[in-house]
Image: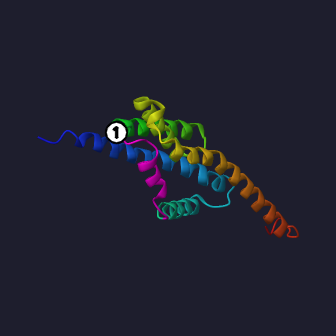
Amino acid sequence: MPDTSLWPLLIVILLGCGLGVVNGFNDAANAIATVIGTRVLSPRNALIMAGVLNFAGAATGVQVARTIGKGILTPGAMSYEVAIAGLVSVILWGALATVKGLPVSLTHGFVSGLAGAGMAILGVNGVVWHAMWPILLWVILAPLLGFIGGFAFMVALYWVFRRTHPSKV
């Protein structure tokens, strides 16, 4: 007779794969839609670019996974049920956001799902708040820094190509 504790682990693994699929749909659509829609790149080249850059991002380290796996919830709050609840919530959120065309961070969504499930088990004491505050801060800072960096890059490009005829650009 198989060990019954194996089933929750298999469910977590399957849901993790589901999260990867939903994350891929959301990221790929938002990352390459602009370059395909504006015809800067062909769909083939845009998919190649997305594949290479997504692999490069995944190969750069595991710090985010380490933070999520060990730093968000207290040991008493982490269980298979909490992981399943967090994964289901972020999969549903990611699918809804993708259908609506919203660019979202499913990593931050997963952190929120885990925190919500942990608080459902142990209340606010289920979350390691000194680890959660930096994450919440970066939820605000990352888009702001992205906007500032994108604006600065755009101004620099305008300046570099200011004397170039638009047909050559």
Q: In the drawing, does residue 167 fall left or right of residue 82?
A: right
Residue 16 is situated, as x and y percent measured from the top left of the image, at: 39, 46
Vertical side of 34 occupied by 167: above or below = below
Tell me if mark 1 has few (under 14), some (14-19) or many (20+) residues whose alpha carbon lies within 10 angstroms of its own. Answer: some
Where is residue 142 drawn, in percent x and y?
A: 64, 51
Q: What residue is at 43 percent from the left and 38 percent from the top?
A: 86
Residue 109: give x, y in percent of width and height.
52, 41
Foreground of the two, 139 or 166: 139
User: Can the viewer see residue 59 in this picture?
Assistant: yes
- Identify the image quadrant of the N terminus: top left
Q: Is residue 62 magenta?
A: yes
Residue 79 position by quadrant: top left
Closer to the camera in the image, 29 or 11: 11
Of residues 60 and 159, which is closer to you in this image? Answer: 60
Residue 161 appearing in the image: no
Q: Indicate the quadrant containing the C terminus: top left, top right, bottom left or bottom right.
A: bottom right
| Residue 78 location, quadrant | top left
- Compare residues 157 and 128 and report the one nearer the observer: 128
> Residue furthest toward the right?
163
Helix, strand, or loop for circle 1?
A: loop
**Left or right of residue 150, residue 72 in this image:** left
- Residue, disc 1: 79
User: Which residue corresponds to the image point at 75% horizontal and 62% vertical from the top-left?
Assistant: 153
Would you say 82 lies left or right of 57 here? left
The magenta-colored residue range is 60-75
Residue drawn 36% across the image and 38% down it: 76
Q: Is residue 150 a member of the stretch shown in magenta?
A: no
Look at 43% across and 34% down and name the residue there: 117
